Structures are given as structure tokens and as C-alpha cells.
Amino acid sequence: MKIAVVGTGYVGLVTGTCLAETGNQVTCVDINENKVKMMQEGKLPIYEPGLELLFHRNIDQKRLLFTNVLADAITDAQIIFLALPTPPGGDGSADLSYVLGAAKDIAKIITDYKVIVTKSTVPVGTADKFTAVIKENTTVECAVVSNPEFLREGVAVEDFMKPDRVVVGTTDERARKLMGELYAPYVRQGNPVIFMDERSSELTKYAANSFLATKISFMNEVANLCELVGADVDMVRRGIGADNRIGNRFLFSGIGYGGSCFPKDVQALAKSAEENKYDFKILNSVMEVNEIQKKVLVQKLKKYYNGDLKGKKFGMWGLAFKPETDDIREAPALYIIDELLKEGATVSVFDPEGMQNVKALLGDKITYGQNAYDVVTDADALLIVTEWSVFRTPDFERLSGALKSKVIFDGRNLYDLQKMIDLGFYYNSIGRKIIS
Ligand code: NAD
């Protein structure tokens, strides 16, 4: 099939590459000229495990092309995917200007039937708004399909190639058939393509992300209570996760959810509920808990240093909002750095992939290490913020030698408590006993 992908960020580039991988002819279009130039030169603008191999293979086979001219991408395409940003607007609702702007631009170009598929996360009713914009600008017939994306950064290629499920929201029979054919190679193991109406599909994405965020905030509250009552959240997690009705995934407590999706999607769903005069109480609590949890590590530091962080030097491991990505959007690390700088502390950071993005944002407000041990040299404490595998089994002897004091504040519960006792560290993690 001939496919166009509009917007070549984390979702668009993975979508375009993975669709080319099953033999489709894909043209990706982006307004960012630098990005397009990079990709035309065969360079990946993002870090995503497994993407590079597929990217090069499909470019070499001329199944994957890049342009910044919309007409070049969409004129011959049967299906046009939109993977455009939907950032939070001023009031928390999703900003649809990119998506609806594209609707207008597309309508002015097309001359034959197109299936236009929204992969962006958009509120209920967007397909109707999109269709209205198309109709205002062309008489050409189109099907507007909602096909929310569930890929996770860090395992995006695997998620796209073998999705748990594909959700397709459309009431157009032709579009339904085409989408079924397009996705068939990805669900050969029997995972479902679930067809539904556009509104249910749009809400499915928000409900999924909000449910996952709820799990995170719930476990963070359990962790906070564990600290007060002397229980261990990791034990509680294992205890409840063994129950099939609960399941053992996504139950880790930490320093709050971040990234480009959960914060904005929970907020947008709450806003959508409010606009429909529904008080979605749980979502408001989920957001409130997350705001508190993002700062929990700083609260712990303040308590330890009797409220005075001035002049303290902290080494930080991890910047990306989660491991295996360079994405730092809404990363808890940024909130923690901001708070520490306000308190007069200095921060030195290391992250395997997120350094460049943070450097572009914070410049010389903080210092950047070449490796994990650089940043703890003469530091008052090590702060662990992202659970990259490389931080799981460090050289503790080297770490002890580099730190000014053997103090670790761990926002991701990476280490065994007994091990920390044996090594003689002060070790303060989330929802577990403090080792001192
Ligand atoms: P992104 O910011 O990484 O990428 C968006 C791209 O669109 C950028 O490259 C930008 O230059 C380009 N763009 C902006 N306006 C354009 C225009 N008019 N024409 C062509 N290109 C344009 O965003 P993302 O993370 O890929 O997210 C895209 C959508 O997918 C959002 O709605 C997001 O909520 C949703 N989503 C994201 C993820 C994720 O893990 N990142 C997962 C599922 C769903």
C-alpha cells in the first residue's frame, strides 16, 4: 500500500518505518527541515532501540522516503497517518491546532478518496471536527479514522511490530477493510484488531493511559504509607501482583510518572470530563499525587540535611523520563534539578542517552559527566532518578571512593537493602526502610 505519515517524531518515525518493513511504500513528511535533512542523509533524529536497523533497511530498499513537502507525501497515498503533536493547551485540554491545521492543508491537496488516520492522541469528538474541516475545504470523499497508538518509547519497534492489540475507530466500510489489510501482518499471532466507532476509539487511548497513571499514583501512595508504618513496598507489590486480577506489571513505586503522554493525557481526560460536566474524581487525585511524588526525593534530601541544601553537591544518575529513551519531556529529573538549584545546591548529571536534550534545555546551569562515576566525584550524595540497566550493578567500591559521603537517595529502588547494609551506605529509597 502507499502510505503517508505526517509528523515524524517518536510515533511517526516508528510508524512509518514499521509500515515500510512489511512492504508498504511509505513517505514521511515533517515541517522540521533539519530533521528531514538528517533522515534523508540516513541519520536517526531520536534514540529508539531496534529502530536503526529497520530504518536503514527500508531506506536502502527505497520503501521509506522523507520530505518536507506535504503534497509530495500525500498525493498518491491511499492512507494518510497523522502523528502530530497534541500538547496541552493553556487550560489543560489537548491543543488540536496541529491536527486540524493538517486537515485543512490535506483537504486542499487531495483529489481522490483517502483514508486519513489519526494516530495522535486526541479527545473524543476530534474525528467529527476533523471531518467538518475536510468538508469545508474539499468535496473529495474521505474517511477519517481514529487509530490511537499504544507504543511505549524504549520498546516502540517491538510494540508496533507485535502490538497487544490494534484499535481502529471507523464507521466507514472501505476504511475498515483497508485498515484490516494493513495491520494483518502485525497481528499474525492472534492479537486482536478491535474495530469500534470513532468516539470509543478516541476515549480508549485516554482511558488506557489514565488507568496506567492511576496504577502508578496508587502504588506511590502505598509506598508513602509503607514508610510511615514500617512496611516494604516491594514486598507489598509482589504480594498483590501475584493475584491474577491485579497482575504484576506496572506496579513499581517511584518518583512519579512523566514523559510526553501520561501527564498531558490524564489532564486532557479530566478536562474533557469537566467540559461534559462530569467530575472525574479519581483523575484529579492521580494528578495531585503525582505532583507531590515528583518532589519526594527533594523532601527526603531536605529532611536529611535539616532543611539546608545550600552548597551541597549532588550527582544524579538518570535524566530521561524512563530508561531506553532520550526523551526528557516532563521527566521527573527536570523537576528535581529545578528544586535543587532553587535551594542553592549544585547538580552534576549522567544519563546514557538523555544528556544532549538536557544540555539544550539547561545549558551550564548544571554540569555533565562523561560517565556515571564522574558526576559523583566529591558529591555529598548520589541521586538515582532513572532506572537504566547500567545503574543496577555499579562498581560500589568505585562509587564509595568517589563520593564525599556514602549516601544514596534512590527514586527507583534499584538496590537490595541487605546489600546496602553490608556495603555501609546510607540508603534512602521509596517505600522501604531507610538504611543508615
Ligand atoms: P513528537 O513531538 O515527537 O513528533 C511530532 C512531529 O510532528 C515533530 O517531528 C514535528 O516537527 C512534526 N510536525 C509538527 N507540525 C507539523 C506539520 N504541520 N506537518 C508535519 N509535521 C509536523 O510527538 P510524538 O511523541 O511522536 O507524539 C505524536 C502524537 O502521538 C501525540 O498526540 C502523542 O500524544 C501521541 N502518542 C505519543 C506516544 C509516545 O510515546 N511518544 C505514544 C502514543 C501516542
Image (tube, rainbow, N blue to C red):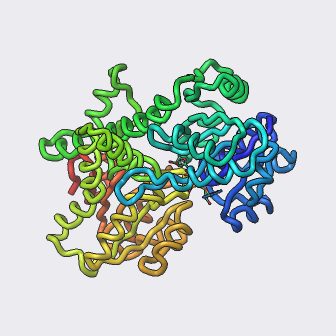
The residue lying at 39 percent from left, 65 percent from top is 334
In this view, the residue in front, 238 or 180, is 180
- Asked whether the viewer can see residue 372, the reply is yes
The residue lying at 45 percent from left, 38 percent from top is 124
In which quarter of the view is residue 215 placed? top left
The residue lying at 77 percent from left, 34 percent from top is 22
Question: What count of labels does the image hold?
Answer: 0
In which quarter of the view is residue 40 placed? bottom right
Picture coordinates of residue 213, whole percent (x, y):
36, 41
Q: Is residue 220 left or right of residue 25?
A: left
Picture coordinates of residue 418, whole percent (x, y):
29, 46
Quadrant position of the N terminus in the picture: top right
- Asked whether the viewer can see residue 150, the reply is no
In this view, the residue in front, 67 or 399, is 67
Does residue 421 lie above or below 380 as drawn?
A: above
Does residue 214 lie above or below 313 as drawn?
A: above
Quadrant position of the C terminus in the picture: bottom left
In this view, the residue in front, 146 or 287, is 146
Picture coordinates of residue 343, whole percent (x, y):
25, 76
In which quarter of the view is residue 331 placed? bottom left
Does residue 182 lie above or below 77 as drawn?
A: above
In this view, the residue in front, 59 or 305, is 59
The residue lying at 33 percent from left, 21 percent from top is 243
Pick out the residue farthest to the right: 61
Pick out the residue farthest to the left: 229
Picture coordinates of residue 385, whole percent (x, y):
39, 57
